[in-house]
Image (tube, rainbow, N blue to C red):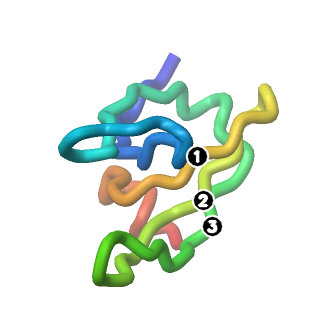
C-alpha cells in the first residue's frame, strides 16, 4: 500500500465556520485519474486537481505531492 497526503476541499453542503479544507491520506493504488482544474475559492481562483478513485468517489484537491504533480 502506497499512501499520499492530499488537501481536499470538503463538500459544499458542509457548513464550516473557518476553512473547508481537509487533509486526507489516499492509497495511490486506488487512484484512477488526476486532472488539473481551476477551483474558485472566495474571491480568487486557484489551481487544483480532480481526483477519481476506483471505488467511484471524486475529490477536488488543492494540494498533492510534488511527485504526482510533476507527472502532469
Q: Name the residue under label 2.
A: 50
Residue at the image position 61 percent from the left and 51 percent from the top: 51
Q: Quadrant of residue 67?
A: bottom left
Rendering coords of residue 53 (x, y %):
70, 37
Left or right: residue 5 versus residue 72 is left
For marks 1 and 3, the one nearer the N-term is 3
Residue at the image position 50 percent from the left and 67 percent from the top: 71
Check disc 2 and report its element: helix, strand or loop.
Answer: strand
Q: Mark 1 points at which residue?
A: 59
Check disc 3 and report its element: helix, strand or loop.
Answer: strand
**Residues under numbered marks 2 and 3 in contact, where contact means CB atoms less than 8 Å apart:** yes
Residue at the image position 68 percent from the left and 44 percent from the top: 58
**Residues under numbered marks 1 and 3 in contact, where contact means CB atoms less than 8 Å apart:** no
Nearest the viewer among 26 and 22 is 22
Left or right: residue 9 versus residue 5 is right
The mark lying in front, picked from 1 and 3, is: 1
**Residues under numbered marks 2 and 1 in contact, where contact means CB atoms less than 8 Å apart:** yes
Amino acid at each position: 500500500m502506497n499512501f499520499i497526503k492530499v488537501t481536499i476541499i470538503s463538500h459544499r453542503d458542509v457548513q464550516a465556520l473557518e476553512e473547508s479544507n481537509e487533509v486526507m491520506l489516499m492509497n495511490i493504488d486506488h487512484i484512477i485519474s488526476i486532472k488539473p482544474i481551476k477551483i474558485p475559492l472566495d474571491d480568487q481562483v486557484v489551481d487544483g486537481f480532480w481526483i477519481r478513485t476506483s471505488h467511484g468517489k471524486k475529490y477536488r484537491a488543492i494540494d498533492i505531492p510534488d511527485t504526482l504533480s510533476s507527472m502532469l
